[in-house]
Amino acid sequence: MKKLIATFATAALLSTAAMSAQQSTEVQADIDAFQNHFLKAFPGKSLNDFADGPYAMSEDKMMQFEAVMEMPPFEDLVNKGEKLWKTPFANGKTYSSCFSGSDETLRVQFPHWSDKKGKFVTLEQSIVDCRKANGEKKMGTGKGKLAYMSAYLTTIAEGQKISVIVPNGNAKALAAYNQGKKEFYAKRGQLNLSCANCHVDAAGQRVRGNTLSPALGHITHFPVWRGKWAKKKGDGFGTIQRRYGGCNKQVRAKPRKRQKAQYTNLEVFHTAMSNGMKISGTAYRE
């Protein structure tokens, strides 16, 4: 895949499909190459088809997915997330007071580069920071109440386009992005596998009865409700960084700490690769 990115790089610099004039040309080259790889590997699929992940790979799987989504098992939890989001803090302020723009646009405002903090910030961490700034107790960043609120924001963002910007000429931002890219392609654990091995090289293939989902479009529907999580942990919801931890465990590697540099920068790279795709709303996964 790294060779593939290099192959497309020159052409990508001339691409008229750049997300923004502010985007790093190096990052845009990666995005174009990454998306072209999947569009060629799965002819007949449009960019937004990849939001359906493994279900887009099979007509039967898609029918099963659509049947589940007619009466989503997580609808009550999304409603709970809305209530939590809109309930004022003890000081009378709400979560919305910590953010700019309408609530419907928050999902696609993140992750973004913060000059003030000198790093990329995620939506989930910003929600936690908002609570702290308003004198509220800290909450977990992988599941539970934070995931419900984040899922609510994903639901109301349906149709908004992903647009992660790594500012052109910003060496620190580019270095953080490249750290996330390295995390995506680095092999780890006893099984010696990378994110890319499963979700780029083997996307669409079957493993233990499941179809490996393409990395393109992963971010369009997180947090997700997983049947596997519901059986083991009760409510089934999890953020993208919770999923990273689960993937690390599956290859028998020690998970990183959520909302620290490794996973946050991985989320930046992972999300940027789906630039231009529409948020599909909170979704079910096996």
Image (cartoon, rainbow, N blue to C red):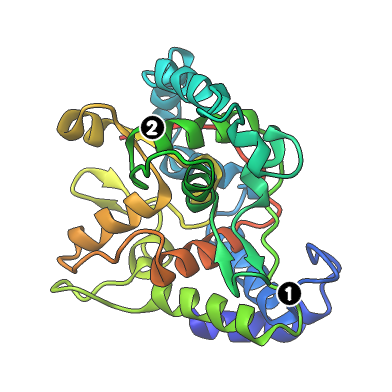
Q: Name the residue nearer the viewer: 150 or 251.
A: 150
User: Quick one: SS at disc 2?
Assistant: helix
Q: Disc number at residue 167? A: 1
Residue 231 higher or lower than 162, as above or below? above
Using residue 101 as the reference point, say whether residue 120 is left or right of it.
Answer: left
Q: Residue at x 50, y 82 (%)?
A: 2
Q: Quadrant of residue 271?
A: bottom right
Q: Earlier in the sequence, mark 1 or mark 2?
A: 2
Image height check: is 99 above or below 119?
Answer: above
Image position, residue 169 (x, y; %): 75, 85
Identify the element where label 1 is drawn.
loop
Residue 48 image position (x, y, % from top left): 64, 44
Residue for badge 2: 145
Q: CA distance from mark 1 to mark 2?
A: 32 Å
- Amino acid on which disc 2 is placed: Lys
**x and y, in percent, of residue 23 in the image:** 76, 72
Closer-to-camera residue (40/223): 223
Rendered residue at 46%/67% (across/down): 266
**Category of crowding for the residue at label 2, using alpha-carbon neighbours closer than 10 angstroms: few (below 14), some (14–19), many (at least 20):** some
Q: Is residue 43 visible?
A: yes
- Tell me if mark 1 has few (under 14), some (14-19) or many (20+) residues whose alpha carbon lies within 10 angstroms of its own: some
**Residue 284 coordinates in the image, percent (x, y):** 40, 30
Q: Which mark is residue 123?
A: none
Kind of residue at disc 1: Pro
Instruction: Please name which of the two marks, 1 or 2, marks the residue nearer to the observer.
Output: 2
Residue 200 falls in which quadrant of the image? bottom left
* Residue 46 seen: no
Nearer-the-camera pick, 145 or 240: 145
